[in-house]
């Protein structure tokens, strides 16, 4: 969960720090944990996330800023966690998304998987093109040696 929480904080905190009313200490670790869990469940239960933010004892400008950044934050989190899964990493956050059968997560994972496969195909094609002249020469030698 730490990785997911760090992704969220690294995106949101700089945005919130632009507001003069915001103090980093006003959002404690408990809030960030609850926010992370609610964001991971956002696709199936968006209301919980909005209720969490609206019940904060903060200036309404800060609440509005957090709410306005939820879609981008969710998208960024999904993207980063899909990459983590592609690398073979496991985490509680990934388990939540997989258990919830998050369509956004499944779509993002499928997308980056196909991008990776396409990249590997292009690398193989490039390698074959580079090796083709040498393969031809080797084949010519093998044929001429077989003829003798």
Image: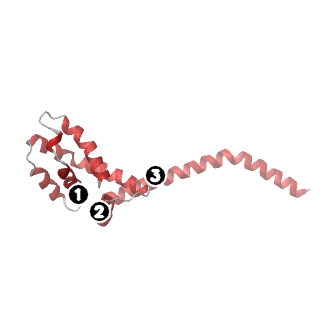
Q: Earlier in the sequence, mark 1 or mark 3?
A: 1
Q: Are marks 2 and 1 in contact (CB under 8 Å)?
A: yes
| Place of residue 65 in the rendered image (x, y in percent of width and height, measured from the top left) | 16, 42
Q: Is residue 49 left or right of residue 144?
A: left
Residue occupied by mark 3 = 115
- The residue under the point 38% across, 59% down is 90
Q: Which residue is mark 2?
A: 96
Q: Residue at x 28, y 65 (%)?
A: 100
Distance of mark 2 from mark 1, alpha carbons?
8 Å
Q: Is residue 44 visible?
A: yes
Q: Residues within 10 Å of mark 1 (few under 14, many from 20)?
A: some
From the image, state whether disc 1 or disc 3 is nearer to you. 1
Foreground: 118 or 105? 105
Q: Position of residue 3 (x, y in %)?
A: 32, 51
Kindly identify which residue carries mark 1: 37
Q: Nearer the viewer, residue 45 or 137?
A: 45
Q: Quadrant of residue 111?
A: bottom left
Q: Badge 3: how crowded within 10 Å, few (<14), some, or many (20+)?
A: few
Residue at 16% in and 45% down: 27
Q: Is residue 131 left or right of residue 106?
A: right
Residue drawn at x 87%, y 58% is 146
Q: Determine the CA span between mark 1 and mark 3.
A: 28 Å
**Image x and y of residue 76, in percent:** 31, 48
Residue 133 image-quadrant placement: top right
């Amino acid at each position: 969960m730490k990785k997911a929480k760090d992704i969220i904080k690294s995106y949101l905190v700089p945005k919130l720090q632009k507001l003069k009313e915001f103090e980093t200490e006003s959002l404690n670790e408990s809030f960030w944990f609850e926010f992370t869990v609610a964001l991971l469940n956002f696709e199936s239960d968006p209301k919980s996330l909005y209720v969490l933010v609206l019940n904060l004892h903060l200036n309404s400008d800060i609440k509005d800023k957090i709410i306005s950044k939820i879609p981008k934050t969710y998208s960024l989190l999904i993207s980063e966690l899909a990459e983590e899964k592609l690398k073979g990493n496991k985490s509680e956050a990934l388990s939540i998304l997989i258990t919830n059968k998050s369509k956004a997560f499944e779509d993002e994972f499928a997308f980056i998987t196909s991008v990776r496969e396409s990249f590997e195909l292009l690398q193989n094609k490039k390698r074959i093109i580079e090796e083709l002249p040498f393969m031809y020469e080797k084949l010519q030698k093998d044929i001429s040696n077989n003829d003798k």
